[in-house]
Image: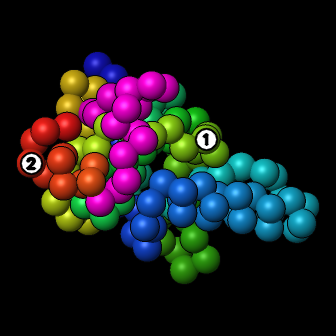
Amino acid sequence: MALYLIKLCVGCESPEDLEEWIAERLEEKLRRGEPEEQYHVTRMVPKQTDEITGGSLYWVIKGMVQCRQRLLDIRPFVDGEGIQRCRLVLEPVVVRTEWQPRRPFQGWRYLKPEDAPADLTAGSGTGDLPDHLRRELTELGLL
């Protein structure tokens, strides 16, 4: 069975903030001559790597799942302090999704495909709403 991951995007105000952060990091790597790949470091290594590789990491921003990125690879490593960590290698393209409320949690969680919000499609109308209105309508269960 395929699985996804879901994680809080701490410090991010919007998917646009996430895109800016990704662009800045990739630009820094280019200047330093490092490989231009985007990854997120986490402490826990997913056990079900085969089921989630090629899937997506869904980002919770301001209490709502708002976007996702395709998960390209999972690379466990040991950091300089001897702590086991993991690089979640992500496609640097942020895909907007329908908003879905989520309570705060630590780390990442598995997400079943049937529980994942749908991608926003061009012309769906909901992506054109201001964030505050989308949030309120989603909280009321109208979106």
Residue at the spot 28% in from the left edge and 44% down from the top edge = 99
Residue 32 vertical placement versus 101 (above, below): below
Which of the 4 image quarters holds residue 104?
bottom left
Q: Are marks 2 and 1 in contact (CB under 8 Å)?
A: no
Colour style of the rendered protein structure: rainbow
Residue 122 in magenta? yes
Q: Position of residue 62 (x, y in %)?
A: 31, 64
Residue position marked by numbered label 2 in the rendering: 140
Residue type at mark 2 is: Leu
Sequence-first tag of 2 and 1? 1
- Secondary structure found at label 2: loop
Q: Which residues are magenta?
A: 116-132
Residue at the spot 63% in from the left edge and 61% down from the top edge = 20
Front label number (2 vs 1): 2
Q: Quadrant of the N terminus?
A: top left
Which of the 4 image quarters holds residue 119?
top left
Identify the disc placed on residue 50.
none
- Secondary structure found at label 1: loop
Residue position marked by numbered label 1 in the rendering: 93
Residue at the spot 28% in from the left edge and 49% down from the top edge = 134
Residue type at mark 1 is: Val
Q: How many marks?
A: 2
Q: Quadrant of the C terminus?
A: top left
